[in-house]
Amino acid sequence: MPLRARCETPGWGPWSIKKAVIYAHAPASALSQIIALRIHLDDSNSNNGPLRVLPGTHTLGVLTDENLHGCATTVSAVECLVPEGGVLAMSPLLVHSSSKSETQAPRRVLHFEYAASRVMGDGLELAVG
């Protein structure tokens, strides 16, 4: 998550800086307060690398690589096919991915994240652009 300042807080990190913005991996308690909205500027179909999700995984918290692999082998992925102009809402905790497009057709998406509050607790505040 992009943050205004670094504040060593349990559950947050590792930390990084990208283009002068401080980032930290966030715990599930912070991620559960966020919703992502994906506005599709083009049709999303099975051939242009649609978003795929593992249903129900948003309830599992932040997963280790081992847990993630386990989910990927036991939970069937669902393709999120969204028409041009459609909006998909999801939790950032939901295990998701997309593959390379098999066509030349564009798959442009505007991705916005909204938080319940700019303050994430313990002195951490989101950096908002």
Image (cartoon, rainbow, N blue to C red):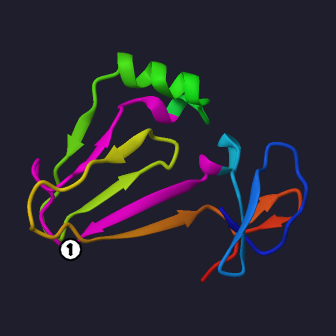
Residue drawn at the location 47% of the way across and 19% of the way down? 70
**Is residue 77 positioned above or below 38 on the image?**
above
* Residue at which label 1 appears: 41
Q: In this view, does 2 lie to the left or right of 37?
A: right
The secondary structure type at the circle numbered 1 is loop
Residue 39's spot in the image, x, y percent? Answer: 29, 68
Q: Is residue 8 left or right of residue 55?
A: right
The type of residue carrying mark 1 is Leu
**Is residue 8 positioned above or below 41 on the image?**
above
Residue 54 falls in image quadrant: top left
Q: Give the range drawn in magenta.
A: 31-58
Residue drawn at the location 11% of the way across and 47% of the way down? 46
**Is residue 14 positioned above or below 124 on the image?**
above
Residue 38: within the magenta? yes
Q: How crowded is mark 1: few (under 14 residues within 10 Å), some or many (20 or more)?
A: some
Residue 55's spot in the image, x, y percent? Answer: 35, 31
Residue 97's spot in the image, x, y percent? Answer: 36, 45
Q: Is residue 1 left or right of residue 123?
A: left
The quadrant of the picture occupied by the N terminus is: bottom right
Residue 106's spot in the image, x, y percent? Answer: 16, 70
**Is residue 26 positioned above or below 68 on the image?**
below
The quadrant of the picture occupied by the C terminus is: bottom right
